[in-house]
Structure formats: C-alpha cells, structure tokens
Amino acid sequence: MNLNTIPLSIYFIVILLLLCAGVKVAKKGEFFDDFLSLDISKGLQGFAAVAIMLHHMTQTVTQYGQHDKGLIGIMNDSGVLFTGMFFFFSGYGLYTSFMKKEDYLKGFLKKRLPVVLIPFYSANIIFVIASLVLGQKMSVGEFFLHISGLVLLNTQMWYIVEIVILYLLFYVIFKFIKKQKVAFPVMAAVMLVMTAGSLLLGHDSQYGGGVWFKGEWWYNTTWLFFVGMVIARYLKDITAFVKKCYVILLPVGIVLVVVMYQATLYMIRHVGYWKEYEGYPGYKEKLLTCLVQSPTVMVFVLVFLMLTMKVQFHNRALKFLGKIAIELYLIHNIFILHLTNVIKADILFYLAVYVGGIVLATAIHYMDQWLIKKICKK
C-alpha cells in the first residue's frame, strides 16, 4: 500500500471528530450560559492547539504552499485563527478573574507568571538540549541567548513571551489606574505602541525569526487579548444582545468570516508582510495586510464563540488536551523539525508529530504542575 496516496485531508476529519464528539445542542430558544466557563474554554484551547499543530505541519510538508498536497493546504494560512483563540481566552480569563476575585492583583506576579513561565522554560530547555544532541552547532553566546529565551531557538514560543508582557502591562496599568474607564484606553494605547513597534522592526534575518517582536506573528493576533478583556467587561450586555438577534447575527457572521478570510488570503498573496528588501522596509504592505487579517481573526473567534452559545463542544479528549494545551503548543515543533527528513510518508509524519507531541507534552505538563505548586505555595 502506497501511504502517499492517502489524502492528508483525513486529518480534517480527525480533528472535527475530536471537536464534535459528545456535542450538545441547546433547545430552541435556549442557550448555554456556561459557554465561556473555564472548563469549556480549556477544551477549546486544546482543540486550538491541535489545529495549530496541523497548520505548522502543513506549512512544513507543503513548504509554505509551494507544493500542492490537496485540501490540507487550507491550513497553510489558518493558524492565526486558532492562535487568536488563545489570546482571547487569556484576555477574557485575566479580566474575569480581576473582576470576580477580591485583591486579585495582590500576589499576581507570584501566582500568575509561574503558570506560563515554567512551561516556557521547561519546553525551551528540552528543545535547546535536544537540538544540541541532534547535532546543531551554536557558540557559547548563542547557547545562553537561546537557553534564556532572549532569542528563541523554537520560534513558536513567541506566544508565551508576548503573553507574559501583556500580563505585566495589565498588572501595572490596572494596579495604578483605579478607574477602569481610563485603564482600558491606556491598555489599548500601550498595545498599539507594541503593535506599531513590532511592525516597524520588520523580520529577523540573523536568527531565523527568533528575535523578539520581529515578524508579523507578533502582532497580527495580539488584539484578541484586548477583545477578550472587553467581552469580559461587558459580557452580560453583549450576550443579551446576541441572544436577542442570534438568528440574524450567526448567519451574517459566518458569511462575513468567509468573505473576510478570502480578502485576507488575497492580501497575503498579493500585498503581504514580506515585501521588504534592502532600502525598502515594506511598512505600507505590512500595515495594509494586518488591517485586513487582524479583524478577520477577531470576527472568526467571535463568531465561533457565538456558535458555542448554541452548540457545546465538550468531551473527555478536549478536556485532556485543554490541560496540556500550553505544553503542546510549545513542544510539538521539536518533532516537526527533527522528523521532517526522517519520515518520508506525509501521513505518517503527521501521525508521529501528533503522538510524539501529545506524549511529551503530557510528561512536561505533570512536571510543570509539580513545579508550579511548589513555587506558588511558598
């Protein structure tokens, strides 16, 4: 049997089954009020993690769309949609906790930062050591840059760096600005500076994308964090309006996602983030592309969440993946990089990355949780 004849689109079916197993549909006129609960949100992040893995593997086997591998090629440009979900839930969860828990910012840094920094450094240390063992050469200076995370050997770890920065900004702004009507615009203004600064930095040619804030992935989904905060602040009013207009909003939203996504694909292919060359930074092209892509991600996430008000995606597999979502996001690239030239059949390459990623992420997760408990109890 020629394994290369099996269409890679079979993995669409796999992740859709993962999402839809045990799905519940609300009765006519009713909605799931817990659609943004921690349990449901974690499961959706687990789904987003495996979708992002599919995106990264597809970019690898198609060499960023240069080779036609069939329907799976759709995933080449879809990763931002699911990264946006991570940012949304981070912003939503952070502000919800701030509103509901008394003195939430007291001890915030000690309690919140280890939850993301420990998985980051666990995965980073494993990644760097594995790369050295498998033959990658680096100077002593480069080793310390990579092991510290100041330059990312695994460029997919950028998300945690940015989340930590956003947490710190939130802490400082909401701790010292008591009026939330002022704190929100200040948070938005600082994030706008971050976005502009990252865009102006262009791309990293020295370390293959490992330098902080050099690359469009550092800013084209970031604003979902702020959207999550806004939704958390006005959740009651927003959900009341959505329920009232649901039969109109959902189909309109779905059409809007399709149209905006097609516009995003056009911008990426014909305008793009990579128009820079010596003497021309390509700022105009970057800005125009981001102004189309970033709102597309926002609309996708909001429409998907609107769907979950009526259709609840919740099962044991999603619950398990939700627990290891951060570790899975951070570590799976080690298998993509080191198995690409080892496993020739694409169908088996995908399977190996999924199995290896989930097994290693699970092991790292339990180690991380032990360390987090030790640190946070002190």
Image: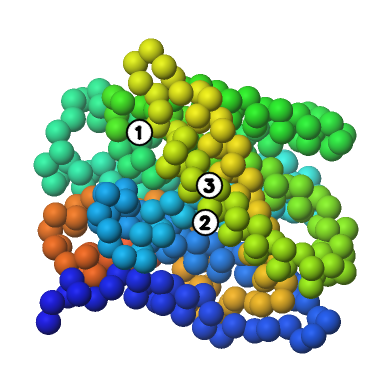
**Residue 53 percent coordinates (x, y):** 38, 59
Disc 3 designates what residue? Answer: 264
Q: Position of residue 296 (x, y in %)?
A: 60, 49
* Label 2 Cα crowd, 10 Å radius (few <14 / some 14-19 / many 20+): many
Is residue 32 visible from the viewing direction of this image?
Answer: yes
Label 2: which secondary element: helix
Dot in front, 2 or 3: 3
Q: Amino acid at mark 3?
A: Thr
Of residues 106 and 319, the one drawn nearer to the viewer in this rendering: 319
Which of disc 1 and disc 3 is earlier in sequence? 1
Q: Which residue is identified by label 1?
A: 209
Q: Secondary structure at mark 1?
A: loop
User: Residue 126, relative to residue 289: is it above or below?
Assistant: below
Q: Residue at x 56, y 44 (%)?
A: 293
Which corner quadrant of the image does residue 278 belong to? top left
Are the residues tagged 3 and 1 within 8 Å (C-beta)?
Answer: no
Image coordinates of residue 113 in percent, x first then y, are: 56, 43
Residue visible at 88% across and 58% down?
A: 237
Marks 2/1 in contact by CB < 8 Å: the verdict is no
Disc 3 vs disc 1: which is toward the camera? 3
Q: Quadrant of residue 208?
A: top left
Q: Residue at x 21, y 25 (%)?
A: 140
Rendering colour mode: rainbow
Three-letter amino acid code at disc 2? Phe
Callout 1: 10 Å neighbours few (<14), some, many (20+)? some
CA gap between label 2 and label 1 equals 20 Å
Mark 2 = which residue? Answer: 82
Quadrant in which the N terminus appears: bottom left
Q: Amino acid at mark 1?
A: Gly
* Secondary structure at numbered mark 3: helix
